[in-house]
């Protein structure tokens, strides 16, 4: 029979992070959010807890866990705040994981220990100003000049790319043309501070205000040839695999936000009175929260199944797309309903649901829009 209960190790991890989120993150994150300030000390604490090293082997300083453990952590963090959760998600699945999956031994030895410890953050340079969903329409280029790659181009909406502890960006670039005229795309590691690599000021964002997101520019940026990550011409395939895994992680984060909406509403409806009664006694409110809980439950099962197939080494692209689609839309629906239940207070940033509402929309866009997820699902069905 199927058993969806977490084993003792997973449950202990979940409880530890739940406590950390409630006691360490929740009391202070609102201030960081309002100031649009990156929470360095919180990130450092997560590093000391080993959260950035969860799915990596002990030889690099990791915890020797798996991707599902990371997903559980993301869910618990996002129940309180998505900025902190996305910093961890991007740092692990987009920053460190491509190096672990495809990097050379020398690249792993140099970079992974710092990334796994949370002492340094990695970023994932795929999206460009003129192309989001059409990731294959890259204009950033890299040519060989002597013993160097020379990069030129611009990347947009890149998480963790401009913090004081950012160490590197793995950049997708066109490195040539195939016989059929299509671009040859490769992944190239660019260390922070490299001459010709510049980082813009932080975006003024609707949500995720305590996370770091910037535009990157490469102007005759030179890095050694050995900074190629994986095989030349395989960069696009590598990035697609990275995104499949990342979608499961984003699904978990979305479930956390959705559950956080339920949590906050359950507290509020037992405190708020209207027309002489606690508003939780009204069936209209009860039905809203029941629907929120049902959506969250289904979304959680979807990402559990996707993660399960991933860990077994089975194809999981469709399940990842389903999980990402269902959970991100659940997060948006729950945030909208939570804001409605809170009324005017739900529109105030001092209340978590106000932040949840601002943070939810990007979950339907980042790491593949809802429309792209539907394309992937339909394609897998043979349509």
Image: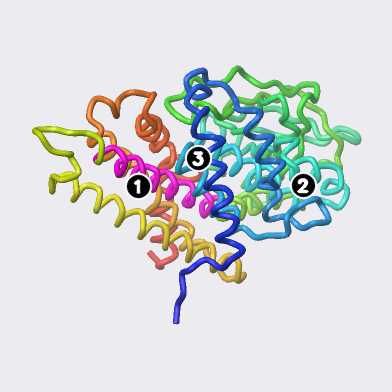
Q: Which mark is residue 22?
A: 3
**Which of 23 and 71 lies nearest the eye of the viewer?**
23
- Residue, disc 1: 329
199 relative to 128 in the view: left or right:
right
- Residue farthest to the left, as pictured: 275
Let me know if residue 175 appears in the view. no
**Element carrying mark 1:** helix
Q: Which mark is residue 27?
A: none
Left or right of 258? Residue 164 is: right
In the picture, the quarter occupied by the C terminus is bottom left
- Marks 2 and 3 sit apart, C-alpha to C-alpha, by 38 Å
Question: Where residue 163 sits in the image (x, y, percent)?
Answer: 67, 26
Magenta-drawn segment: 246-269
Q: Earlier in the sequence, mark 2 or mark 3?
A: 3
Asked whether, in this view, residue 116 is left or right of residue 311, the answer is: right
Tell which tag, 3 or 1, sits nearer the viewer. 3
Identity of the residue furthest to the right in this view? 147
Query: Label 3: few (<14), some or many (≥20) within 10 Å?
Result: some
Of residues 322 and 41, the one drawn nearer to the viewer in this rendering = 41
Could you classify mark 2 by the number of other residues whose Cα lies within 10 Å: few (under 14), some (14-19), or many (20 or more)? Answer: many
Q: Which mark is residue 229?
A: 2
Circle nearer the viewer, 1 or 2: 1
């Amino acid at each position: 029979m199927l058993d969806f209960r977490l084993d003792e190790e997973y449950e202990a991890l979940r409880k530890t992070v739940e406590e950390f989120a409630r006691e360490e993150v929740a009391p202070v994150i609102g201030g960081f959010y309002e100031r649009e300030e990156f929470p360095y000390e919180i990130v450092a604490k997560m590093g000391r807890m080993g959260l950035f090293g969860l799915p990596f082997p002990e030889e690099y300083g990791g915890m020797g866990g798996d991707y599902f453990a990371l997903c559980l952590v993301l869910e618990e963090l996002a129940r309180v705040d998505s900025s902190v959760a996305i910093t961890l998600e991007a740092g692990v699945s987009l920053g460190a994981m491509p190096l672990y999956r495809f990097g050379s031994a020398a690249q792993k030895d140099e970079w992974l220990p710092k990334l796994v410890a949370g002492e340094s953050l990695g970023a994932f340079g795929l999206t460009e100003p003129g192309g989001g969903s059409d990731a294959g329409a890259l204009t950033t280029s890299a040519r060989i000049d002597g013993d160097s790659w020379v990069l030129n181009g611009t990347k947009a909406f890149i998480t963790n790319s401009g913090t004081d502890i950012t160490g590197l960006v793995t950049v997708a670039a066109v490195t040539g043309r195939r016989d059929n005229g299509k671009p040859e795309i490769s992944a190239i590691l660019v260390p922070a501070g490299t001459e010709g690599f510049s980082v813009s000021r932080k975006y003024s964002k609707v949500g995720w205000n305590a996370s770091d997101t910037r535009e990157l520019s490469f102007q005759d940026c030179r890095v050694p040839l050995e900074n190629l990550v994986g095989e030349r011409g395989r960069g696009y395939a590598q990035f697609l695999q990275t995104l499949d895994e990342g979608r499961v992680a984003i699904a978990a984060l979305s479930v956390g936000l959705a559950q956080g909406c339920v949590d906050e509403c359950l507290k509020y409806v037992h405190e708020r009175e209207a027309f002489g009664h606690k508003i939780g006694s009204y069936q209209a409110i009860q039905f809203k929260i029941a629907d929120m809980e049902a959506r969250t439950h289904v979304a959680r099962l979807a990402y559990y199944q996707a993660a399960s197939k991933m860990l077994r080494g089975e194809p999981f692209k469709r399940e990842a797309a389903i999980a990402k689609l269902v959970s991100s839309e659940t997060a948006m629906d729950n945030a909208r309903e939570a804001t409605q239940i809170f009324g005017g207070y739900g529109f105030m940033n001092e209340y978590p649901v106000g932040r949840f509402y601002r943070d939810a929309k990007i979950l339907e866009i980042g790491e593949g829009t809802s429309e792209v997820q539907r394309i992937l699902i339909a394609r897998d069905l043979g349509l």
